[in-house]
């Protein structure tokens, strides 16, 4: 016997909304208090449900953390696609990405927090965050090699493209961190200016 | 009546050594567990004394935190002076600084941790860390303007020098963070390569 759409869609949708609400609350709480500092109780209260309800939806605090990182990942990917372009156009669009990030402070906070906490190999998100950084660097390196193929940048070895990609990712993360600490820092302006000089030197 | 040097020097020196031992233990503990996660008890045990002994030396956990940031500051300043040079020579020497940092993982860990935690305006080191970043950026901006005065970089406004300084500081912090997470990242190589291209574009 198959259930009718009407019978499943309601509770299914409610579950998705509840999960999204918990991930939202956990993003804020992990960003503010750190993963270890934020209890399931704190997250549950912010999401308007019981700790047991949160654990029923996610299984454990660690799996909730994975969901938070997945969400940050999905949101970043969406923003990057929205900024658009390939090769050098992509690199030139990165300051716009920082401007978008400035409107999402809780996401930046949780990202900065988890990045630091996950440096501990014992941290439950360690492997996930390490892998995410490798993917991000590889994605950037691919765009740089795309720019080389377009004739917009001089030839570089894949290893050098990886190094440049690490630098550009670092530049963005470091600027975001300065801005979180001190919102007077003009992060998009600093990135724009620096990248334009770097592009002039690279071409 | 004045005490003789022999009478004062001993205990005075013992106090300095004990303070240094506590700051060392606190650097490691705050770096690993975060400021809120690391208790005075944990720090005291690592330093081989009682929590009361730690509080007698520093007054409070917050003042101990200030001492940890001061130490990180003093150590960074010492390393920067050791790397040496002014203007463009200074900028070119920065990868050496990252190599020195790689040999001081606990200091990098506490720096990365506190940088993130102190973004919260309620954090006891907030003002100190914000001020430190402003000083570091101003110091970099001064070196860039020095390079301009030497004719090694084209003219730039002080506001643009500040933006470039923010970018270079970000680059170093971001690379250090990637390296903490994943020691396979070639942080000094990435900085060297990126800065050389940037210098070529700027000159």
Image: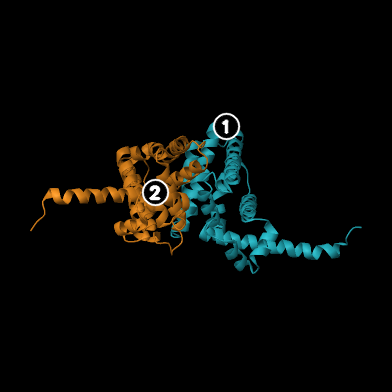
Chain colours: A cyan, B orange
**Do marks 2 and 1 both belong to one polypeptide chain?**
no
Residue B63: image quadrant is: bottom left
The mark lying in front, picked from 2 and 1, is 2
Q: In the drawing, what numbered circle is on residue A28?
A: none
Can residue B129 be seen here? The reply is yes
Q: Quadrant of the N terminus of chain B?
A: bottom left
Q: Secondary structure at mark 2?
A: helix
Chain containing mark 1: A
Residue B46 numbered tag: 2
Q: Residue at x 10, y 51 (%)?
A: B4
How far separated are the C-alphas under marks 2 and 1? 45 Å
Q: Is residue A202 above or below residue B46?
A: above
Location of the C terminus of chain B (image quadrant): top left
Q: Residue at x 30, y 59 (%)?
A: B56
Disc 1 target residue: A158
Q: Taking A171 as reference, is A53 left or right?
A: right
Q: Is residue B5 left or right of residue A13?
A: left
- In the image shown, does B38 or B47 lie closer to the viewer? B47
Q: Compare residues A54 and B78 and report the one nearer the observer.
A: A54
């Amino acid at each position: 016997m198959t259930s009718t759409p009407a019978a499943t869609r309601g509770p299914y949708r409610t579950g998705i909304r509840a999960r999204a609400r918990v991930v939202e609350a956990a993003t804020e709480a992990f960003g503010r208090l750190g993963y270890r500092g934020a209890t399931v109780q704190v997250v549950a209260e912010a999401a308007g449900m019981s700790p047991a309800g949160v654990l029923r939806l996610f299984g454990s605090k660690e799996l909730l953390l994975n969901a938070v990182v997945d969400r940050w990942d999905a949101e970043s990917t969406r923003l990057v696609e929205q900024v658009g372009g390939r090769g050098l156009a992509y690199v030139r669009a990165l300051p716009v990405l920082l401007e978008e990030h400035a409107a999402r402070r809780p996401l930046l906070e949780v990202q900065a927090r988890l990045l630091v906490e996950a440096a501990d190999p014992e941290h439950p998100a360690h492997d996930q965050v390490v892998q995410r950084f490798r993917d991000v660097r590889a994605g950037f390196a691919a765009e740089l090699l795309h720019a080389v193929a377009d004739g917009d940048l001089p030839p570089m070895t894949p290893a050098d493209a990886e190094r440049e990609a690490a630098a550009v990712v670092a530049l963005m993360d470091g600027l975001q961190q300065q801005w979180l600490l001190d919102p007077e820092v003009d992060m998009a302006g600093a990135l724009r200016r620096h990248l334009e000089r770097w592009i002039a030197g690279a071409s």
